Image (spheres, rainbow, N blue to C red):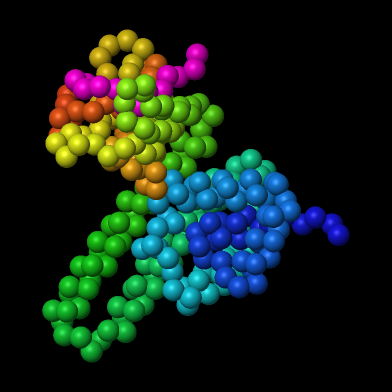
Amino acid sequence: MTERHLNPEDVDLYALGALDGQDKASLEAHVQSCAECRRELREAQRLTMLLGLSEAPLAPPPSVKQALMQRVRADRAEPVQQVLREQPRRTPWRLRLSLASAFAALLLALAVSRLWKLDHLRQQEIAALQGQLRSAQAQVSAEAATIRTVNAVVGAPDTVQIALLQQPTGPPGQAHILFNARMGVVIYSGEVAPAPADRSYQLWLVPSSGAPVSAGLVAANQSNQAVVVHLAPGLAAKAFAVTLEPHGGMPQPTGPKVLVGALNG
Ligand SMILES: [Zn+2]
């Protein structure tokens, strides 16, 4: 039988936890025997982890999954989607992020349609719900902006990836950074043993010359939720480090280095 690879959309839906029944079973069966699709799936799962999209609050009820599936299938028939799908497979991030964005927008649209049905509520209650909707919309815009930033950084040829490793006398941990000097964007994800209650972990860009630049505080566990930091564009970094600082952080590093990673070359 001729090998037919999985649709990228199905891989995304599976990674988002939105694939059901026969579709889910055949995807799982296919990745068992296909290394290429297994690799695609791992990448999609890493991305949903990175963006925190696989967490419980976004897990849709069955009706939403149904609507999403219909939407994705409808999209497949549209010329625009065809053009996008004909792009080389080496640029799947952009498509995947668009899908994540569409997913968030769909959830918002469902929330809006529910609000319209609540006409039996008194004016005051409706106002409160409209407030919630506005903040949900603001959250979606903020997430969309973050997704656009991540998308741009991941897709840029001048983005570098740096592994931050634990130090011999420090707590166990590991983190990864995507850094684009031209854009001044740092994307951090990783995990380190929890800090003492009166201490904070702080991320630093160590420039080629001059004093370290704070990239803000990071939580001990940022493995499911990447931190996106905007610094001044054009900073030439030679390393990144996480240090243990007094609660709330410091203008310059004072504490021990916990995780360190140098840029190659
Ligand atoms: Zn395959």
Question: Quadrant where the N terminus lies?
Answer: bottom right
Q: Quadrant of residue 28?
A: bottom right
Q: Residue at x 50, y 62 (%)?
A: 17
Residue, far right: 1
Residue, far front: 169
Residue 161: tell me if it is visible.
yes
Q: Quadrant of residue 253?
A: top left
Residue 87: tell me if it is visible.
no
Q: Is residue 114 above or below residue 9?
A: below
Residue 109: image location, x then y, percent: 39, 70
Q: Residue at x 45, y 28 (%)?
A: 163
Viewer-proximal residue, 121 or 15?
Answer: 15
Residue 122: image location, x then y, percent: 16, 85
Give the residues drawn in magenta, as a range: 252-265
Residue, far top: 209
Q: Quadrant of residue 174?
A: top left
Q: Is residue 261 magenta?
A: yes
Residue 27: image location, x then y, percent: 66, 61
- 137 to the left or right of 245: right
Residue 146: image location, x then y, percent: 37, 46
Viewer-proximal residue, 172 or 9?
Answer: 172
Viewer-proximal residue, 199 or 227?
Answer: 199
Q: Is residue 134 above or below residue 223?
A: below
